[in-house]
Amino acid sequence: GHRVLLRLLLPTAPAEEMRYLEPDDEALFLPQVANPSSSKKTAELRRREHLAFLRAPLLTLCGRHCEQLARSRCGSKVLQAALLLWHPPTLIRCLARLMAGLPAEHEEEE
């Protein structure tokens, strides 16, 4: 699941730096040309709508499980992407506490 989240959070990341999906999976994110009348929204608009819907629950999840995600190779990439995209103060404070050797304390996102 982390690869799809990363592709949604950072779609324009340089391929040599962040390769998230296999080539077969990458096709799922390409514009569909078979039925162009099925959606009048651009791919970027749909992406922004998905991100708006996922923002609060994803940041809550990142805050509640900050320590576990930070210690996980895949989880740390999701944390990094969320930080780059939204700069959430509560998540920044949580990570700062972890880096200072203090226990992470979950705060609800403002």
Image: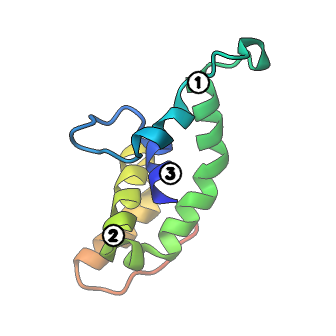
Residue type for callout 3: Leu
- The residue where tag 1 is placed is 43
* Mark 2, residue position: 95
Q: Residue 17: where, in percent of width, then height?
A: 22, 43
Image quadrant for the C terminus?
A: bottom right
Rate crowding at label 1 as few (under 14), some (14 to 19) or many (20 or more) other CA atoms within 10 Å.
Answer: some
Question: Viewer-proximal residue, 100 or 85?
Answer: 85
Question: Residue drawn at (77%, 12%), measured in percent from left and top?
Answer: 37
The image shows residue 26, relative to residue 40, as above or below, that is below
Q: Amino acid at mark 2?
A: Leu
Picture quadrant where residue 7 is located:
top left
Q: Residue 11, how many percent across, how many down?
A: 42, 35
**Marks 1 and 3: CB-CB under 8 Å?**
no
Which amino acid is tagged 1?
Ala
Disc 2, SS: helix
> Which labelled disc corresponds to residue 21?
none
Considering every residue shown, the one lying at the far right of the view is 38
Q: CA distance from mark 2 to mark 3?
A: 20 Å
Q: Which residue is mark 3?
A: 5
Residue 85 in picture, x, y percent from top left: 42, 43
Residue 109 visible to an observer of this rendering: no
Residue at (43, 58) in percent of width and height: 89
Of pointers 2 and 1, the one earlier in the residue sequence: 1
Q: With respect to residue 49, does 108 lie above or below?
A: below
Q: Quick one: label 2 or label 3, which is nearer the N terminus?
A: 3
